[in-house]
Structures are given as structure tokens and as C-alpha cells.
Image (spheres, rainbow, N blue to C red):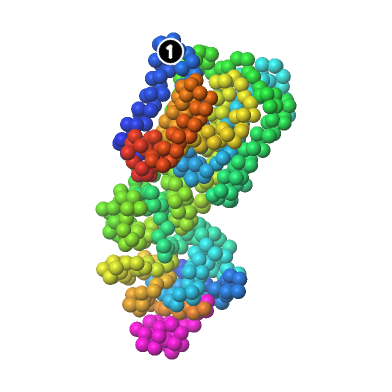
Amino acid sequence: MTAGGGRERIVNAGLAALLLAVPLWAHWAGEPFTITLATRAAILALAGVGLNLALGTGGLVSLGHAAFFGLGGYAMGILAYHAQTVTPLPLWDLAGTRSMPVIWLVAVVGGAAVAALVGALSLRSSGVYFIMLTLAFGQMCFYFAVAWPAYGGEDGLSIWVRNGFPGLNTLDPLQFFLLVYAVLVAVIWMMARITASPFGLALAAARQSPARVEAVGGRPFRLRLVAFVISGAVTALAGALFADLNRFVSPSMLNWQTSGELIVIVVLGGVARLFGPVAGAIVLVALEHWLGGISDYWQIALGVALLAVVLFARGGLVGALAGRPVAHD
Amino acid sequence: MTDPMTDPMTDPMTGPAPILEVIGLRKRFGALQATDGVSLDLRAGEIHALIGPNGAGKSTLIGQIAGALRPDAGRVLIAGQDVTAMDTAGRARLGLARTFQISALAMEMTVLQNVVLGVAGATRGLWRLWRPALRDAALLDPARAALARTGLTGEAATPVAALSHGQRRRLELALALVLRPRLFVMDEPLAGLGTDGSAAMTRTLDTLRDTAPILLVEHDMDAVFRLADRISVLVEGRIVATGPPDAIRADSHVRRAYLGADGP
């Protein structure tokens, strides 16, 4: 996930500008729903950026990232639920909270902890076995959420008022978008640093030639585990924001279809491309909105777009626009 | 590198302790005894060649020395330290620099990125997550020096996938050089090189023994007999002879088992 060559930088800047310009225009034009769509795209992009470190740079095809996404969602849902019902949290006898920074911290720490556990158990395997193990962990979380009645079970959990962030009115769509956008940009910048660091090189090399990493004294398992933990933490953060956007969290966030959607976002935009998930999320949300308004079968169009990318543009949309098939320069 | 005069490992009776000691190594795959009680050592300043017909167990032996394979019995010592239970990464950190028979390189990364990775590995820098590797002079300077020494300076920005076979062999060597090696373990560094490339690589290996001793597995007998200070002959998992090139050339067992009646 390198910053790429000069042309890719221009594509990246264009994507960042587009994602910012659309809601600003919508605010001016008085179309708050478009701002919500842009916020949805930014949050899904954030989840994709998290997944991309594992899937793209690390080559770890996780079909269980919905677990982290949903975990972030439930971190928000549970904390806000106890705040709005003024009941203490189970186990710890602490109060809930409506503060986004606290919720984010819980989501990130929780996501990292679960990713450490899942990674430690599944990274011993590789290829299709790794995919199946992550899928199994994800589905375990899904069924647990469905069966657990305390927080709505299958019906999910509604939050009455969006949580707050110091100094902002998060009920204002544009302000909430700008907050999400700032988080996305900060995390992408962090990912750019990580992937360009010696750790990032070693992680990418472990994907391409594990024997080489061992020969220079590195241990692919540990590198991948740390990448998986960072990846899970970022995706959990996105999940907390997603639940706050909808003021609702349900087991569907944990379902394997959500994992698949995150993979679609990464592949569509460009595997291991820094801004790939941004492009992928914009396209997914745009198709979902426009084509979804025309036909319930809009996902056929998504399938065609995905086929086209996989067959003709292996670098995804960012790769096609930047004209460089290989992400690592 | 340790100074043999002050090195506590030095025994005045027997000279410096070997950099690498392999004692009674055994490895069986099913019915095949691939390594059958192999003992050998590698001393400072020497090239010790390991030769033998195909299927003699050379790669299995190298795998056990480098840490990729666990022996069933026997011990491996690097500079007196028992590393039998240590993994590949641990042995690399002790200074075992391995080159692969089939290049093991990060194909999508550039030549410079590959070598910088090696430098980061050698300096325990793989856990730095924040500073860009290609802007860190502490990583770049040794990497560039190794590229210069292997004649790859002009290819620094080339993706490995675009390199020729010979250039990849040189990159393998550059990656071994940046590891601050105590010993080299090289698996057929001349394989697939043309006459010119082979001659150039032979000259490079000749100068390399001063950097660190080399355990050399090689099929090119001309190069082996020109380079090696000692040669061990491996046949069916057993070392049938060890000695200087002249002695090996004259050894009747070796001639019969391996070199053929009119060998070099």
C-alpha cells in the first residue's frame, strides 16, 4: 500500500477532493441525504482501508472482518444504550457513554483484542483454510449476536440520539461527515506511514516470499499478526462510526455478507492501493443508491463491475486511473 | 566479527573454534534416510564446498543448517552456540546468511526495497512502523553499498520481476551481504548463469571468504575445485570424504561414487 507514483498521487488527491466536494455541494444545494450517502461511503472506505492492510499488503484474505466491523458497532450500541437508559454496564458496573472519543477507544481496543485472538488462531494456516477460519470466527460472532437477547438479538438495537463529539454538533449531517472524513484522512495517512515503514516492507515481502523474510531474520507469523490487529482495530473504528451514522446496530453488520462487501470495496478500488477503498466505497454507495432506486437487482450491475475489474483492471479503479498495474513501486 | 586472538572460543591447541559445526545430523523422510549422520564444520576464512550427485541430500542438509528443517537427531552450532532448536529467523540474526537455489525475493518490490528490507532485518529494524524505510539513511547507505558491491546500482529502482536471472542471483548475494554475515550458506549460486556470469560470480565468491566463510553447494565442478579450501562429498546422505581439492580429486571412493573415472 505505497503512496505510489506521481500519477497515483494525483488520482488519490482527486478521490479525496471528490469525497469532500460532494457533501459540501449537497450542503449548499440543501440535499442532506446526499451528505448521508457521502458519510456512508467515507465510513465504508475506512473499513476497507483497515481490511486493505491485511488483504492487500499482507495478502491475508479475511472473510471475517465483519466481526470487527460489527464489534465496533456493538461497542457504540451497548455504551450508548446504557447511557440512554441510565443503567450500568454489565460485569463492570460502569455507566454507559455518549462520547464518541470514548466509544472509539473501546471499539479500537476491542477490535484489536479480538483480532489478536482470531489472528493468533487462524494465521497458522494460509490460503483457503485461512479464509474458512476467519469466516467461521465471523459467523460465530454473528450467531452470538443473534442469540443474545440483552441487546435486541436479531432485531438489533436502536439509539435515540447520535453520540457527541466535543465542540461539534454531530446531529448536523455536514459536521458529522467532516468528522468522519477527518478520521478517514488521518487513518489513511497512518496507513501510508505504516506501509512505507520497514514493517510494511517486511509485511509485503512476507506475502511475496516468506522464505526471504525469514532469511533476513523476520518472522512472517508475527508480522502478519500485528498487521491483522491493526487491520481489525481500524475496521472496528469504522463499525462504531457506521452504527452512529444509522443510530442502529444489528447482527447484519456481523454477517459474512458484510465481510464480502468489504472485500468488494477493496478489490473494486484496488488491492493494496492506499486510496483503493475510497474509490471502491464511492462506487459501491453510488451504485447502491442510483441503481438500487431503479431496480432491486442492482447488485447484478455490481457483479458486472467487479468482473470487469478482476478481468481487465487488476489494480482496481485506482490502478486503472493511475495506469500502473503493480502496487509496489 | 571476533578476533581470533582475543576470542574466548579460541583454543590454542586446535585453533579458532569453527564458525559452523554440524554434529551427527540425521533426517529421515519415510523410508528415505536423507541425512545419515553428517558431521562437518566451517572455519573462518575458508570456502567449504559440499558436492554430491543429485538426490544425495544436499538441500535437506542445507535446510537443517539454515533452520527450515528440523533434524531427527544431531546438533547444529553457530560460533559455539547450539542452534538446533532455533528457527530460520533466529539463525539469520546470529549471522547465518543464506542464498537460495531458486531465488527467494519479493518480486513486486524494487531491488532497493529488497535490500533495505535485508538491512532492516540485520539491524532488528523490522518492527519500526512509522519512519519510511526509503528515507532512512541508516537503512539506505548499507543497502546502496551492497548494491555497488554486486554491480546492481543501476537497477536500484527496477522491480525484481523485471530482473534477469543473473541479476537476481546478484541480488541474492547483496541480500546476504547486508546481513552482517558470520557465515554464508549458498545453495548453487552459479546455477543458470552463463559462462561470463559464472566467471564473474566465481571471482566475487573468491573475495567473499574474507568477509565470512562460505558453505558452498555447487554443481559447477570447475568453480568448486578453483574456489574451495575444503570439499566434502555427500553420497546417499553420508559424507564419504572431506579434504582439500587435490585429495578429493585423488580419492578413489569419490571417483567411483561421483566424479566418474576421468573426473576433473
Q: Where is residue B24 drawn, in percent x and y? A: 56, 75
Q: How many numbered callouts?
A: 1
Say if A248 sits above or below B225 in the image: above
Magenta span includes B104: no
Q: Residues within 10 Å of mark 1 (few under 14, many from 20)?
A: some
| SS label for mark 1 | helix
Say if A195 sits above or below B98 in the image: above
Task: Return the residue nearer the eye: A135 or B14.
Answer: A135
Residue at the spot 54% in from the left edge and 59% down from the top edge: B87
Say if A159 sits above or below B189 in the image: above
Residue at the spot 45% in from the left edge and 61% down from the top edge: B95
Q: Where is residue B117 drawn, in percent x and y? A: 41, 50
Task: Return the residue nearer the eye: A58 or A63.
Answer: A63
Q: Amino acid at mark 1?
A: His
> Residue A314's image quarter?
top left
Residue at the spot 51% in from the left edge and 70% down from the top edge: B61
Mark 1 — residue? A27
Span shown in magenta: B237-264
